[in-house]
Image (tube, helix red, strand yellow):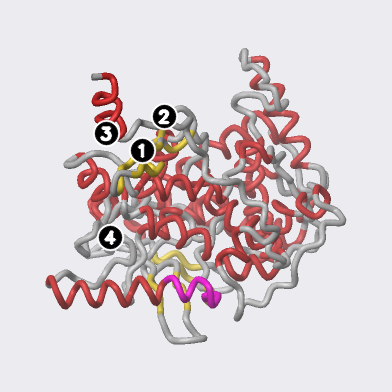
Amino acid sequence: MIVIRHSESKDGESTEIPAGDMTLEQAREHPPALTALAHYAEDKLFELRILNAPATVTYSSAITRFLESRDPSTNDREADRRRRALNKRRNVRDPHYTFEGMRARAKVLIAEFFKGRKLASRPKRLPTEIKQFLVKKCLAAGATMDKNGQVAGALDSNVAAYVSVVRQTLDWLYDTFDPHISLQMDSFKPKTVRSDALKWSDCRNVMLWSQGYVWENGGFARHWVEYDGDFRLEYKKLPEPQLSEHRSEFLPLLRFVPSLATTGSRPTVGSLLCWNEDDYLGHVELNGKRSLIHRTGNDGPNYANKPRQTSSLTPLARGFFEVFHAKDVREAARRGWPVDRVIHNGRGGPVDDLAKLFKRACEALGIKNSARKLKHLAVTMHWFAGFELRRIARIVGTDPKTTEDYYLYLEKEYEGLMRPRPDPEKMTFVDLADPLRDLAKIPRAPAPPRPRAQSHLVERTLVDA
């Protein structure tokens, strides 16, 4: 192999280019080797500047170096293609797509926002400046502002994605080089509209609808059912065979929703959990009070901005999974199904796209949310149940600092709220989902008129005759 070696430190770095019978002079003139040498020299120059004169380093060059360290692609195009194809079969988002989104945002920041700006200009107010820049850019392009003061293309979620690129870059500089310069940046707190947030009452309606109950006119339909000559008003279900088809398609949501609500896992992670350890996918490890949820395998993806950390299961979450596992073991023994996926198609097999399935259920009920809101639901449910944000972060597997940045608004918005003191060992699901016991009742469609009993009709006919 052709190796690049530093003349003073004698440190070397392989170019992965076979040397073969090349002489030293031929290796020095080899075009790919020259490209690798230029890249190596740039890296060394950047390292010297960030260590000795960090204030002269530009944000653009720092972001560029950070992206190079995160690029999941290799020099082998065929290997990259096979990886993408394998992730597609696994229904897992390939790291390449996440990286491409990050790189697209970085290009805008480098070309239009930072330009030649250096680290000497402290990054403290960068989140506010980035938001102002994006709002101005989108308004100039003809974007409109909604009733909540959000501009299309510069929503707080979009701004947070741009700020995340900068925050990850600064964290990478600290972890890799530890430069002697302050790079502290203010937190960006997205504006949260509680009316748009997913509530447990919405999830409860999704679970009822998944079982085949009919939704119409803003509530679950009811009909009169006769029992021994007396009529009772009951919730209406779909007729057969439509009911069986509907239930077989949407029943996986009965596990999907409570699993994500109690663990705070992201939809992609929660929908692919296994009962047994997997090299790529996450799994649930049931071991009494030491039960864990591993959100990714040893070879699976783990993103810096969305870490998939292992967490201990709360007693409540553990109870759900123990019931699910026991049922799967029984059904597998009876029917010969595999005991592999935590959330399956009713026969032990994987479900194609649970997030899309949940979204379809929400659309059928007129709920404007999607599966990505379930993590927000998990955090807010635990907070109202009395858990503190740093403890919640450990439950849902995210960074405590990030969790506080996004959800400190709860402390301000509900200042003075008397929350219960949680006792995880005794907590029931009602304590988690409805600690104040004020959950809205199940919505009902208007009741149809009560029918008259057939026997009464017969008696009236005889009297009239």
Occupied quadrant, residue 381: bottom right
Residue 454's tag is: 3
- The circle on residue 224 is 1
Residue 25 x/y as whole percent: 36, 58
Q: What quarter of the picture does the C terminus occupy?
A: top left
Q: Label 2: how many residues lie within 10 Å, few (<14), some (14-19) or many (20+)?
A: few
Mark 4 or mark 2, which has the lower sequence index? 4
For the magenta stretch, what is the residue range? 313-320
Q: Which residue is mark 2?
A: 448
Label 4: how many Cα within 10 Å (few below 14, some 14–19, many 20+):
many
The answer to which quarter of the image holds residue 425 is bottom right
Residues tagged 1 and 2 counted as in contact (Cβ below 8 A): yes
Packing grade of label 1 (10 A; few <14, some 14-19, many >=20) is some
Residue 407 visible in the picture: yes
The relative height of residue 46 versus residue 127 in the rendered view (above or below) is below
Disc 4: which residue: 344
- Mark 1 or mark 3: name the one nearer the start of the chain: 1
